[in-house]
Image: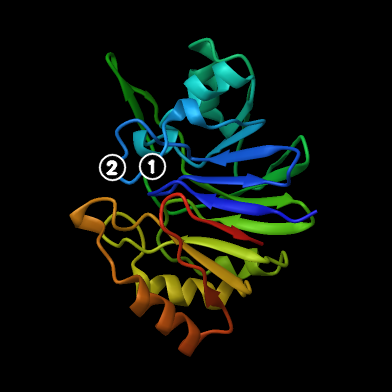
Amino acid sequence: MAVTLKYHGHASFELTDGTTTVLVDPWFTGNPAAVVSADDVKADTILITHAHSDHVGDSAAIATRTGATIITVNELANYLSAKGVPNVAGGNHGGTIEFIGGSAKFTQAWHSSAYADETGIVAPGVPAGFIVRYGGLAIYFAGDTALFGDMALIGEEGIDVAVLPIGDKFTMGPSDAVRAAKFVGAKTVIPSHFNTFPAIAQDTDAFAAALSEKTSSKAAVLKPGETVTL
């Protein structure tokens, strides 16, 4: 069964095999790039790469409404569980958690991670990426990260699709994302974390051209609301 990936803007994605739905970093409320609301989406599983608010987003509300299981790093998982989110599973780098229809393996990510509520910083934790095995594919969601050499080890996992940030300033920029693509070796690279705000504005045509010229990967650049069949 084919897997469809939909881009919801910024770093928010949706995977479906026609039977189940996986959301990754579902930020809709306050996301200037989003074209739907949190109430419009369904989910069986929600993956959160790290505790920044533009990635935690609407996860708790969606999970509470749909009964979806949230999979995320342990400190954030404990916080969400304590806040009453019914189904939360925490893990850490190197671990794998199975979900309905697939699994998610935590990978390292070089970034920061902290969630703040009205009381202050409540879930510091660590950032992560995920190798998602779903619908017969291996999809690498790098999360917010800098370039790091051990992406070559991630590539040894047989990655079919890599979702890489290109915004620069808060993550790696386009040139480092091209280098990351070489390490990972995925046939398809989907850029994320770009053009939401002026600070992370990027020329996606230039990125796609550089990727094609310097690697064996091809870019699939999506606008918010667009889908691609993987």
Horizontally, residue 14 falls left or right of residue 197, namely right
Q: Which residue is painted at 45% across and 29% down in the image?
A: 38
Which residue of the protein is positioned furthest toward the left in this rendering? Answer: 198
- Count every numbered label the image shows and give the total: 2
**At which x and y percent is residue 200?**
26, 58
Dot 1: few (<14), some (14–19), or many (≥20) neighbours within 10 Å?
few
Dot 2: few (<14), some (14–19), or many (≥20) neighbours within 10 Å?
few
Q: Secondary structure at mark 1?
A: loop
187 and 97: which one is in front? 187
Q: Is any part of residue 150 visible from this angle?
A: no
Checking the image for residue 106, the label placed there is: none
Q: Are marks 1 and 2 in contact (CB under 8 Å)?
A: no
Q: Which residue is painted at 32% across and 39% down in the image?
A: 31
> Quadrant of residue 66 in the image?
top right
Foreground: disc 1 or disc 2? 1
Q: Which residue is painted at 67% across and 47% down in the image?
A: 105
Horizontally, residue 193 falls left or right of residue 154, namely left
Disc 2 marks a residue whose amino acid type is Pro
**At which x and y percent is residue 30?**
29, 33
**At which x and y percent is residue 208?**
43, 77
Residue underneath mark 2: 32
Residue underneath mark 1: 35
Q: Is any part of residue 90 visible from this angle?
A: yes
Disc 1 marks a residue whose amino acid type is Val
- Identify whether 111 is placed above or below 182: above
105 and 225: which one is in front? 225
23 and 156: which one is in front? 23
